Amino acid sequence: MRFPLSIKECFSTAIKVLLIATMLPIGQSQAPAIVSLTPPQIPVPASYFGLHLHLYSPETWPQAPFSELRLWDSKDAIWYAIEPRKGQWNFNQLDNDVQMAEQHGVNLLLTLGQTPQWASMRPGDPPTYRPGATAPPRDEEDWKTYVRTVAIRYQGRIHQYEVWNEPNLTEFYSGTREQLFTLAKDAYQIVHEVDPSAIVVSPSITGGYAVGWLNHYLDLGGGKYADVIGYHFYATPRNPESVLVVIQQVEETMRSHGINKPLWNTESGYLIKSDFLDFPPGQGSMNRILTQEEAVGYVMRTYLLNWASGVSRLYWYDWDGNKMGLADNLGKQKKPAANGYSTMEHWMVGATIRSCSADAAQNWSCELSRDNRKQWIVWNAEKVNQRAIPSAWKVQQFSTVSPAGVEISGKIDSSQFISYTPIPTLLQ
């Protein structure tokens, strides 16, 4: 993802996804008519909830619960900024980022890559950020030195590393998969030599159309040199339910290569209306801009459905980017979607999602258990739909979030009807 430019349209293991209806080809907007997911049967950890930040200061630090932070599009946290000239290192900003994360008890995922012009194989490549940054390094030893220097400096402080961002897009990477495989192999070996407990995430690609790219990369042996498989499961401009087919395809690709490793969604988000920033003319025709009210339900459903589909971490893009941010005014003012995010974190963390399914009318129901108590999260992906509460649920209370982001709760019983809306409701 580029910040603050607009996002591209894209789709984006311990699970089985049963698509009872015929799966639609990638590119169509509807989800399958009937869906049944079998989530991992473990409590949702706090580490599932991650964010992106661009500004690091006490006044812009997220007013929301999260324990994981991906350092992408964070100022000066990338190779060309860290080593602007060969052997000359600039760690001032990254040191500050690491220190602030430690003060808040947050773990970091650092994305390695974006070559300095002096080291670039093609220093004149058109810049997305800087000239030559998308090309692999001319000398592999320069890459090794960079990775080793960073890993040694932040040993025991940065515990997770990711090799490159969205390398299937030429705006971020202009080399071959074979060259990227070599860089990833080097990084994996060096990071683990310096810090055996560190986690290395594979190059995180994006788009439903990119599953073939992943298959080729894994054919090269890429899965061997990664502790986690990374992917960007963007659904925009479609609803969160539309990405389930892509998640299943990625998991099937992993299984076909004998890879039984965690799958992380290291970047996902939507364009959300901002009160402080106008969208450029025409942007809305290319990428759907969610109203702040729509974004509440989209954020909540994205987190729930990714976990129910087997994704074990999700970094929302972003907190303070205005166009995609959960907070406006450079992170100082929460949008309603930020409260939707916090509410879903509260509902999910510590609970075990037992099942998640949808009927032909896109009425969704997910069963949770917490402290031997059953709970249900219900919603409709497309409209408001009145439904009777199953008497066997013995429901006594409900909680939800209003379109304005205000949490609402009250008493209810199983003899009543409940509104299935695009904003999920918790029944217990």
Image (cartoon, rainbow, N blue to C red):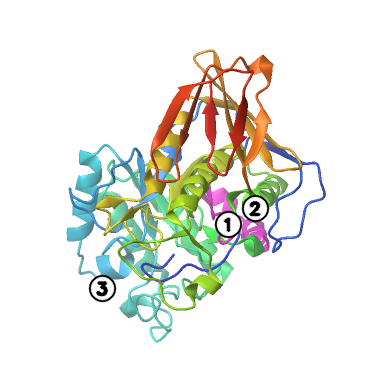
Q: What range is drawn magenta here?
A: 211-238
Question: Which x, y percent locates residue 159?
Answer: 35, 43
Mark 1 Cα-neighbour bin, 10 Å: few <14, some 14–19, many ≥20: many
Cα–Cα span, label 1 and label 2: 6 Å
Residue at 30% x, 70% y: name it.
80
Quickly name the residue at label 3.
Answer: 86
Whether the residues at callouts 3 and 1 have beta carbons within 8 Å, the answer is no
Q: In the picture shown, does residue 105 fall above or below 336?
A: above
Look at discs 2 and 3 and give the one toward the viewer.
Answer: 2
Circle 1: residue type: Ala
Q: Where is residue 410, by image quadrant?
A: top left
Q: Is residue 331 left or right of residue 121?
A: left
Whether the residues at callouts 1 and 2 have beta carbons within 8 Å, the answer is yes
Q: Which structural element holds mark 1? A: loop
Residue 228 shows in this picture: no
Quickly name the residue at label 1.
Answer: 235
Circle 3: residue type: Lys
